[in-house]
Amino acid sequence: MSTTEYTKVYYGNFILVTRVKDALEGVGIIPIIKDEGESQRLAGYASMNAGFQEVFVHNDELEKATEIVERVKVDMEA
């Protein structure tokens, strides 16, 4: 994944990533979810990242996505 086109906006477990993904999709932002732990498992390797995923968005949507992610993080803390 090219770092010039996409930026990571969140990292967490499957459940929290799903909340962030749903919030982003709700405003028309389609994120890319990267799960290296699952990729390693499928390749037959042990993984230290089991259950953790990364959320990336296109740089054109970064500002709006960052605001949404921060809002979701505040909601999760409440």
Image (cartoon, rainbow, N blue to C red):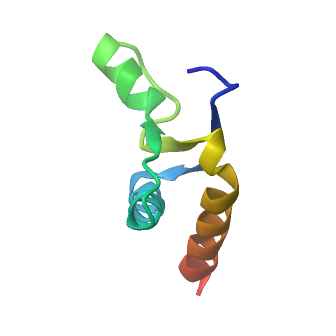
Answer left or right for 16 relative to 6. Answer: left
In-image side of 40 versus 10 (left or right): left
From where the camera sits, is residue 9 visible?
A: no
Is residue 32 depicted above or below 63 in this figure? above
Tell which of 11 and 51 is nearer to you.
11
Would you identify the image quadrant in which residue 21 lies?
A: bottom left
**Residue reaching furthest front?**
60
Q: Residue at x 51, y 34 (%)?
A: 49
**Relative to 59, residue 44 above or below:** above
In the foreground, 28 or 53:
28
- On-image quarter of the N terminus: top right
Q: Looking at the picture, how far across and down is residue 19, in whole percent?
A: 42, 65
Image location (x, y in percent) of residue 5: 63, 29
Whole-percent x, y for residue 24 in the image: 47, 61
Q: Nearer the viewer, residue 49 or 67?
A: 67
Can you give x and y, in whole percent of width and height, for residue 59 in the image? 65, 40
Kindly identify the residue that appears in the image at 39 percent across and 58 percent down: 18
Q: Is residue 60 visible?
A: yes
In the image, what residue occupies the spot 54% across and 77% down? 76
In the rendered image, which quarter is residue 46 located in? Answer: top left
